[in-house]
Image: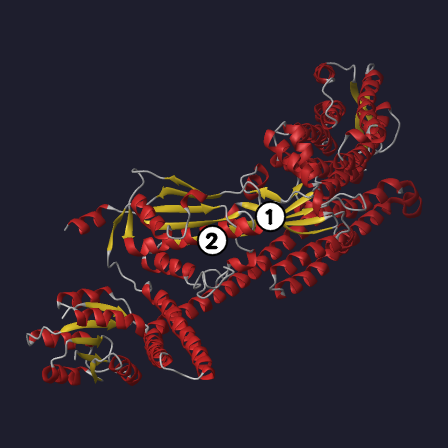
Amino acid sequence: MPKLLIVDDESDIREFAKRFFLKRNIEVFTASGGIEALDIIEKENPDLVLLDVNMEQTSGVEVLKKLRERKNDVKVIMVTGVEDESVINEVNSWGVRGYIHKPLVLEELEKIVLAELVKK
Amino acid sequence: MLTIVKGLSLSTFLISALLIVLMVFVLIKNSKSPVNLSFALVCLSAAIWLFSYSQAYNSSYTEEILFWFKVGYPGVVFIAITYLHFANVILKIKSTRKIIIFSYIVGFFMAYLIWTSNFIVNGLNEFKWGFYPKAGKLHPYFLMIFLGLVNAASAQIGYTYFLKRKEFASLTLQQLKYILLAFGIFTLASIDFIPNYGINILPLGFIPVTIFLSIICYSIIKYRLMDISLAITRTGIFLVVYSFVLGIPFAIAFGCREFLFILFNDNWWIIPLVSSTILATGGPYIYLYIQKQAENNLLKEQRQYQSTLRQASLGMGRIKDLKKLLQLIVHIVARAVRIEHCEIYLLHEASNQYVLKASKGRLKVDQVSVLPIDSILVKEMIKIKEPFVYDEINQRSHDYQDKNLSEIEQIMKNLDGALLVPSFIEERLIAIIVLGKKKSGKLYSHDDLAVFSILANQSALAIENAQFYEDMKKTHEQLFRAEKMATIGTMADGLSHQINNRLHAMGFIAGDALDTIRIKKKEALPEDIKIVFEDIEHSLDRIQDNVKRGGEIVEGLLKYTRKGEEGFSPVDLDKLFDASFEMAQFKIKVNEIDVVKNFNETTPQIYGNFTQLQEVLFNIIDNSYDAMVQRKNDLKEPNYRGRLEVNATKKGRKIEIVIKDNGMGVKEEDLNKLFAPFFTTKLSSKKGTGLGLYVIRQIIEENHGGKVEFLSKLGIGSETHLTLPIVTEGDDTKILS
């Protein structure tokens, strides 16, 4: 069963995304912040991480940076609110599968996520 | 005996001095005008006559007396000649030039005869009161010529005044009336010829000359005869009063001498002496009294105006609404004097012209609506800073054959303005007040001009005040709007994240619910539950759709509000336009519209952010296309074909790009709202988010330091003007390094 980690400080997002992907036979983990996310990645080694850029404590960009510093090359998709060239440039250099733009309807997210998981 | 002669001497001396003063006044004002010059000659001739006579009366030696009389007598001759000359000049009669010159020659010949022979002046007549020149053999002929010339001159003026009125401006006619009266009285001085023939009459000719002087002074003041200003009003009154104060004792002395002699014997002279003492003491009081009376009469109108003015200035200062103020000014002017019409033309700096803003008493249709700032009338008015009187301009343009003056005359004629009053603030002519003719048919007096000048300048202050107030109000509104926009800008950043997150969550919630429903639907369900599920499915679908659109709005709002020169580079207009047009092509059917590009490789490069500018051009092209489609559908013109025209012009260090379409255009009342976010005129709200023009302004003005202007006329089309910086050397090096 493929493993998906959803990192978002919005509980609604975590709850409903989890419910959605569970129905598709995907093992879903959620993290409400950067530190928690790093822990889960270490422990569970997910196939894909949906990483929110804009979080109250540790930002998605920092999480990504730490992961790469630890030589962890887990697949990451950044979830951004606002298209900001500087963020995109930074994220690109850290190696991400891509970035998606809030708000995004689940059907579209599903396509992206399934495509990434299939590539495994 | 001594007293009479001394009195004559003093009086004639005084009058000759006054004549010289008047002559100098007239010459100082305008020594080139033939009218002033010939009048000065009249004064000079009379002054020579009276001065020499005063010297003769003052002397006790017969030889010396005769000498002075002979010096003065030619003055008498030349009074007649110069008067004729003056009359011909003021009546603009040119055909008599030779006659005038001949008269002068005759005059010099007579002067020669007087000095070298006894034909005209032959020794002295001795009267009880003193000596007087005796008429020679040819004196009767001399007298005939003299009276002939004087009467010819008066007849010419009289003829013009009474029978040829229509050919002259009303101002000139008024002047002629006073000239005729003045010289008519002057002619009475001819009684001085009687003692020449040994008849014992006192030579009191200086008295009519005094009256002549007073009348001329009066008409100078009242009717600007020979353009002399009001400055001599008081001098004039002073002269008149003192001639009377001093004249009365002499009149008593001369006129009632016989009678007094019977009453008081040898002491008769006490009466004139006492009366002169009393009058001299009372003189200043009498002067003040008469001055007051005279000014009351002379300046009666001015006094009336002053109260109107005071009321007006009180009222004007309070009015802050410019339109109302201008109406009030026009109203006040029309009320102060009953005039046919009155207009006010206000400076409109943007268009460099004076625009008709308020009027009274005339239909709008026949009024001149603008006066260009570079018209000769405005230029001259700024130079001269004085009111323009049509009659005067008319007269002068004929007198001097001046092209500028006749042009001004023509403009005033078109305005139907009898009087144009400038409204100045320091050096700035901010308004021109046009006054029509007075209903009474009277002329504008000097008092009128003074009063209207004051009124005009007070109006200028009030107008500036009102304009300032209106500008301030506008600035306030703009500031308020800008502040609102700035608040929206700062709030947008923080707010959009929040909204985005909410939308995102909402999308997930709806999406998951939809997902659940769709899975459940596949199972065998009772029909009624299936219908409920379908309804819910539809609702959730709609929620998702709205989430998407909400996201687009937030994105649009945020995407282009970032400042700074990040991503700035030289941009080719040609490439930019093509890229933008390509963006729009999924919607636009290219063969449906004409695209005209009026720029080429030589058009300077823009210095800016390509992506942002592409967004701008795309938005404009998109808007234009929608407007064209709307026009096609709404107006249903048979031969309509959309046309998009792009022009680029270099303007200093900027480039102006004008995108012009022949679409539907925008209603005037909507124009101001166009650049506010969330305003859209597109009928179907599906088509636009209402952010297009707002984003365009953000990109052009905030991010690029440029300018965007949108002009539109409903049913005709729209123009978007973009002013953007062009590439300079500094920008190039920045890019290369």
Q: Where is residue B426 in the image (x, y as percent from the top left)?
A: 52, 52
For the N terminus of chain B, give its image quadrant: top right
Q: Which chain carries label 1?
A: B
Q: Position of residue B328 (x, y in %)?
A: 68, 59
Residues at marks 1 and 2, common chain?
yes
Question: Which residue is at the front of the view, B666 or B275?
Answer: B666
Above or below, comparing residue B390 to residue B529 in the picture: above
What type is the residue that disc 1 sits on?
Val
| Secondary-structure class at tag 1 | strand
Question: Which residue is at the front of the view, B517 or B502?
Answer: B517
Q: Residues within 10 Å of mark 2 (few under 14, many from 20)?
A: many
Above or below, comparing residue B718 to residue B5 in the picture: below
Q: Is B170 displayed left or right of B560 in the figure?
A: right
Cα–Cα gap, marks 1 and 2: 38 Å
The residue singled out by tag 2 in the image is: B626
Residue lying furthest left in this view?
A71
Q: Is B296 displayed left or right of B347 in the figure?
A: right
Is tag 1's residue or tag 2's residue first in the polypeptide sequence? 1
The residue singled out by tag 1 in the image is: B355
| Secondary-structure class at tag 2 | helix
Numbered badge on residue B382? none
Q: Is B536 displayed left or right of B417 in the figure?
A: left
What type is the residue that disc 2 sits on?
Asp
Q: How crowded is mark 1: few (under 14 residues within 10 Å), some or many (20 or more)?
A: some
Q: Are marks 1 and 2 in contact (CB under 8 Å)?
A: no
Q: Is residue B134 visible?
A: yes
Q: Where is residue B278 in the image (x, y as percent from the top left)?
A: 79, 54
